[in-house]
Amino acid sequence: RIVYWGDSFGTGPAVQRAVADPPGALILEEPYASMQFFVEDTSAMNLSDSFVLDAEWNNEGRIAAVHVPLLQLHGTADTVIDFENSKRIYARANDPKELVAVEGGEHGALHTRLGPRYREVMVGFLSAHLP
């Protein structure tokens, strides 16, 4: 079975693709709720609106149309894409879904923060949801 796996800005295309062509499962690491929310509320990158708002990457709006198992991972210390983004997506996602809040996890370093548990989380999720 195919799994779509998006990380950070790659979560937008992963969610969009999951709506159009459902995979066996969807994994989102450090996702943003929408570009609008990212720019207005959580960006520590000082990007201008025009740099990111031309794209229609609305994960929070699209996730309700995804009907496959979902795993989200997000660090609670992420200063690039605030953890609030994951909570917003998770609230609108269909079951089955799982949100792994990585205490102290920073952007781009979840695998380092979790160590061997990172693999355990991934294998456990995929084993539970893919035949």
Image: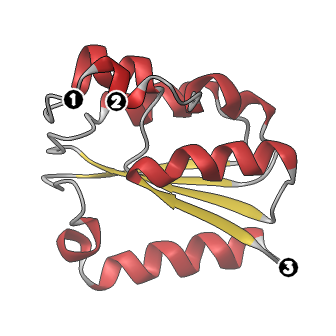
**N-term-proximal mark, 1 vs 3:** 1
Q: Is residue 108 above or below residue 33?
A: below
Asked if residue 44 lies left or right of residue 74, the reply is left
Residue 86: % across, % down: 42, 36
Residue for point 57% across, 76% down: 124
Residue matched to label 3: 131
Q: Which of the 4 quarters of the picture holds residue 45? A: top left
Identify the disc placed on residue 47: 1
Location of mark 2 (residue):
51
Above/below status of 98 relative to 56? below
Q: Where on the picture, by quarter, is residue 82?
A: top left
The residue type indicated by label 2 comes to Phe
Q: Secondary structure at mark 1?
A: loop
Question: Mark 2: few, some, or many residues within 10 Å (few <14, many ≥20)?
Answer: few
**Spatial separation of the CA atoms under disc 3 and disc 2:** 41 Å
**Amino acid found under the numbered disc labelled 3:** Pro
Q: Secondary structure at mark 2?
A: helix
Q: Is residue 71 left or right of residue 102?
A: right
For the N terminus, the image quarter is bottom right
The answer to whether marks 1 and 3 mark residues whose Cβ atoms lie closer than 8 Å is no
Task: Kindly report the distance in space between the C-alpha atoms of the residues bearing marks 1 and 3.
Answer: 42 Å
Label 3 crowd bin: few (<14), some (14–19), many (20+), radius 10 Å:
few
Q: Does the residue at mark 2 contact the one at mark 1 (Cβ under 8 Å)?
A: yes
**Looking at the image, which is closer to me, 62 or 110?**
62
Residue 98 image offset from top left, x and y in percent: 55, 50
Left or right side of 128 for 105: left
Q: Mark 3 or mark 2: which comes first in sequence?
A: 2
Q: Identify the residue at image location x=75%, y=68%.
A: 129
Q: Position of residue 130 (x, y in %)?
A: 79, 74
For badge 1, the amino acid type reads: Leu
In the image, taking residue 131 as reference, residue 59 lies left or right, namely left
